[in-house]
Image: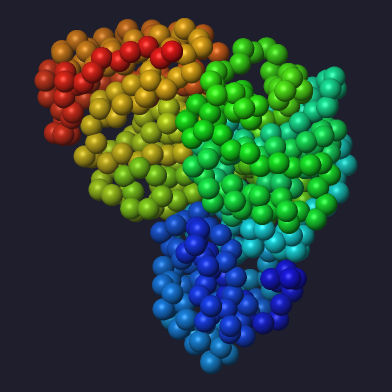
């Protein structure tokens, strides 16, 4: 089938996650070309139906099957894409290969450079991806130039927040056949890209493999992300001419299995996942002892988009940010690094009044200030995490309980290999539990977290104490109130009845 853009017929795109995007047979038999295109990332609008002809698209949000049939019938009968009472209409380039800017909640936030394919191009259509400039040949020198400025995205990236170019040169020059691992485990933004724009990710991965002389690409995801895994496998089959073999494998759904070296352990088939000591890093000794580059789909999609100059008119780098927690429906948006986190939160409906946010994933930092910019430097300066997740916490949340649960999770789910993480998280969980008995020791919390951050061998342990460190600093009054026997939120669990935390083995 040719690319969608080559058709002069009306095109009806149905954007949603999973089976919701599959139009009924009655609609498929119309003269319009009706195709599922994957989720946009803003699920509150989905199923989102976009009716396009030439350079005009009408959008219908939360479109049921019955309404879809009516929308298609009205557009065909009136010979007008704007028939059927759309929620928004946009004029755009007739050959647009990414979702045009549209004034709908969530989709109007930020930009859609890396997310451009999501909700617009068919996820596994090689024709659609090629029409967008994909599958182009790139000189290795150009790839390395791009890597000099590109930073790794997400804690599952072996170059998290660091420029990737140096590790690429190391892998290229190391002995043995190199490999590229696409680590899609655990991040909602990475799962979205693998499910809605897998060819963007594969294009970046195979381009990198060619540049460093790698002989294999492995796409690794959680076994729980079934849709992303299925779509990635279909995309591998659809890729017209990969320069190296590409394999898709799954690992256990445990959070720690997304850590780069534990991801390698899972790919190798090891049942007991433990972080590897570094140095040497994976770029020297990685998968099966070979030099290996471990990057997230976000990093590789940014590479693919950047190499073809498809970063919009505004230029500048962007970050994918997923907002979840106490919200009506989660959303993933793309913000310039200079934009504030509040722009991402504005893309969702908060369930209640916002009290705080946990910024940076499971072990993010707690703050009430969403004026921080989305770039990694600004987030790090504010003591927050850079994983690309903002978890909204409403007024009904007890922050002491929230932090206590995150810390107990770290104590119970760490791999057990290094003492600072294994023992430190256990001691920290018990320090927080002591608050309910009237013993609040903020200096002890800060000292213990500092040791964990300086001494743990992987980012699990480095980050595990961050919720406690930031919460006891910014929300000290809540901890002091609990030590006095009061929960400001009025719904705190009784930690005195909770079981003692035991050391992971």
Residue positioned 51% across, 65% down in the render: 21
Task: State left or right for residue 431 relative to residue 81.
Answer: left
Tell me residue 142's x, y (percent).
84, 40
Of the 4 image quadrants, the one containing the C terminus is top left
Tell me residue 310's x, y (percent).
71, 53
Tell me residue 204's x, y (percent).
73, 44
Examine the rendered structure and indicate whether residue 297 appears above or below residue 92. Answer: above
Residue 79 sits in which quadrant? bottom right
Residue 299 in view here: no
Residue positioned 64% across, 13% down in the render: 278
Of the 4 image quadrants, the one containing the N terminus is bottom right
Examine the rendered structure and indicate whether residue 412 appears above or below residue 325. Answer: above
In the picture as drawn, the residue positioned furthest to the bottom comes out as 77
Task: State left or right for residue 49 relative to residue 291.
Answer: left
Examine the rendered structure and indicate whether residue 410 appears above or below residue 32. Answer: above
Foreground of the two, 45 or 162: 45
In the picture as drawn, the residue positioned furthest to the left comes out as 485
Foreground of the two, 233 or 270: 270
Foreground of the two, 274 or 149: 274
Tell me residue 136's x, y (percent).
83, 52
Residue 412 sits in which quadrant? top left
Task: State left or right for residue 278 relative to residue 109.
Answer: right
Q: Which of the colour schemes (rainbow, by chain, secondary structure, one colour) is used?
A: rainbow
Foreground of the two, 378 or 87: 87
Residue positioned 79% across, 42% down in the render: 245
Residue 243 in view here: yes
Number of dots carrying numbers: 0
Residue positioned 55% across, 45% down in the render: 191
Residue 131 sits in which quadrant? bottom right
């Amino acid at each position: 089938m040719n690319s969608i853009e080559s058709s002069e017929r009306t095109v009806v795109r149905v954007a949603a996650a999973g089976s919701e995007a599959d139009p009924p047979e009655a609609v498929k038999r119309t003269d319009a070309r009706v195709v599922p295109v994957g989720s946009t990332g803003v699920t509150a609008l989905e199923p989102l139906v976009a009716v396009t002809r030439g350079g005009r698209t009408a959008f219908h949000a939360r479109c049921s099957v019955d309404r879809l049939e009516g929308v298609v019938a009205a557009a065909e009968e009136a010979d007008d894409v704007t028939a059927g009472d759309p929620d928004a209409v946009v004029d755009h380039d007739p050959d647009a290969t990414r979702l045009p800017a549209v004034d709908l909640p969530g989709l109007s936030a930020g930009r859609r450079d890396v997310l451009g394919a999501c909700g617009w191009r068919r996820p596994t259509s090689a024709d659609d991806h090629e029409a967008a400039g994909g599958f182009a040949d790139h000189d290795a020198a150009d790839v390395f130039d791009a890597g000099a400025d590109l930073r790794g995205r997400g804690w599952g990236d072996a170059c998290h927040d660091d420029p990737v170019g140096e590790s690429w040169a190391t892998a290229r020059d190391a002995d043995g056949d190199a490999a590229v691992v696409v680590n899609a485990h655990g991040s909602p933004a990475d799962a979205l890209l693998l499910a809605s724009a897998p060819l963007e990710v594969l294009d970046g991965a195979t381009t990198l493999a060619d540049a460093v002389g790698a002989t294999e690409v492995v796409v690794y995801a959680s076994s729980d992300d079934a849709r992303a895994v299925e779509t990635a496998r279909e995309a591998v089959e659809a890729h017209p001419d990969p320069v190296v073999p590409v394999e898709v494998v799954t690992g256990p759904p445990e959070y720690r299995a997304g850590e780069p070296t534990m991801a390698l352990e899972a790919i190798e088939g090891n049942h007991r996942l433990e972080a590897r000591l570094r140095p040497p890093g994976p770029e020297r000794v990685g998968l099966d002892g070979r030099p290996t580059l471990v990057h997230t789909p976000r990093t590789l999609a940014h590479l693919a988009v950047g190499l073809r100059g498809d970063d919009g008119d505004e230029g500048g780098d962007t970050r994918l940010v997923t907002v979840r927690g106490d919200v009506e429906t989660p959303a993933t948006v793309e913000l310039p690094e200079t934009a504030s986190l509040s722009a991402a939160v504005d893309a969702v409906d908060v369930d209640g009044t916002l009290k705080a946010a946990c910024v940076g994933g499971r072990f993010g930092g707690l703050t009430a200030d969403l004026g921080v910019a989305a770039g990694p430097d600004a987030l790090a300066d504010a003591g927050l995490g850079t994983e690309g997740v903002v978890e909204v916490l409403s007024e009904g949340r007890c922050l002491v309980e929230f932090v206590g649960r995150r810390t107990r999770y770290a104590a119970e789910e760490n791999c057990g290999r290094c003492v600072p993480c294994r023992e430190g998280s256990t001691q920290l969980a018990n320090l927080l539990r002591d608050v309910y008995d009237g013993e609040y020791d903020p200096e002890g919390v800060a000292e213990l977290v500092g040791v964990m951050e300086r001494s743990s061998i992987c980012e699990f342990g480095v980050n595990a104490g961050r919720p406690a460190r930031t919460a006891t600093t910014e929300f000290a009054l809540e901890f002091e109130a609990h030590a006095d026997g009061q929960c400001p939120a009025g719904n705190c669990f009784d930690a005195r009845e909770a079981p003692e935390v035991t050391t992971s083995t």
